[in-house]
Image: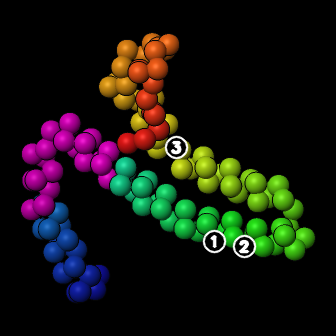
Amino acid sequence: MNRYLKMFLMVAVIACVFTASSAFAQTDESVFTTVLSKLLNTFKNIRNVIFVVGGFGLVGLGFAAIFGKVKWPWLAALACGLAIVALAGAMVDYVTQSDGGSGNISDYETDWDDTLTN
């Protein structure tokens, strides 16, 4: 093997040995909490990128549909897709959180809340 490759592998192994001790100190709950927070952060960031790209797509498809170059259902499909992406996080939060009350449907207007706001 090349001398530099051996040196690199040795440094990598030593770095792994010294950094792995902090990973063993975590409990299962903290590991899953960290993974969950990173996944939520990634979802929010990807969602923001999708909104920006989708917004430009809506404008472009709108102009193309007005001038007859694209079919109107394509514009509607993109708008519906962006709406689904926008509501995905709120729907998952609504379904999975237990602080939404007893789960019973109320007939009293004072008990009606907007469930899709944070």
Query: Is the residue under label 1 in contact with that under label 3 (CB below 8 Å)?
Result: no
Stretch of the chain drawn in magenta: 18-38
Q: Label 1 belongs to which residue?
A: 56
Which residue is depicted at the point 42% across and 61% down? 45
Please tell me the numbered disc located at residue 60. 2
**The N terminus lies in quadrant:** bottom left
Q: Left of 117 or right of it: where is 84?
A: right
SS under mark 2: helix
Which residue is depicted at the point 9% across and 62% down? 18
Q: Residues within 10 Å of mark 1 (few under 14, many from 20)?
A: few
Marks 2 and 3, how far apart at CA: 24 Å
Q: Which quadrant holds residue 9?
A: bottom left
Amino acid type, residue under disc 1 in the picture: Phe
Say which label, 3 or 1, has the lower sequence index: 1
Marks 1 and 2, how far apart at CA: 6 Å
Which residue is depicted at the point 17% across and 67% down? 13
Query: Is the residue under label 2 in contact with that under label 1 (CB below 8 Å)?
Result: yes
SS under mark 1: helix
Amino acid type, residue under disc 3 in the picture: Ala
Query: Compared with residue 114, is residue 37 higher up or lower down, i.e. above or below?
Result: below
Q: Label 3 belongs to which residue?
A: 88
Marks 3 and 1, how far apart at CA: 21 Å
Q: Is residue 92 visible?
A: no
- The image shows residue 23 at horizontal and vertical percentages of 15, 51
- The image shows residue 62 at horizontal and vertical percentages of 76, 68
Please tell me the numbered disc located at residue 36. none
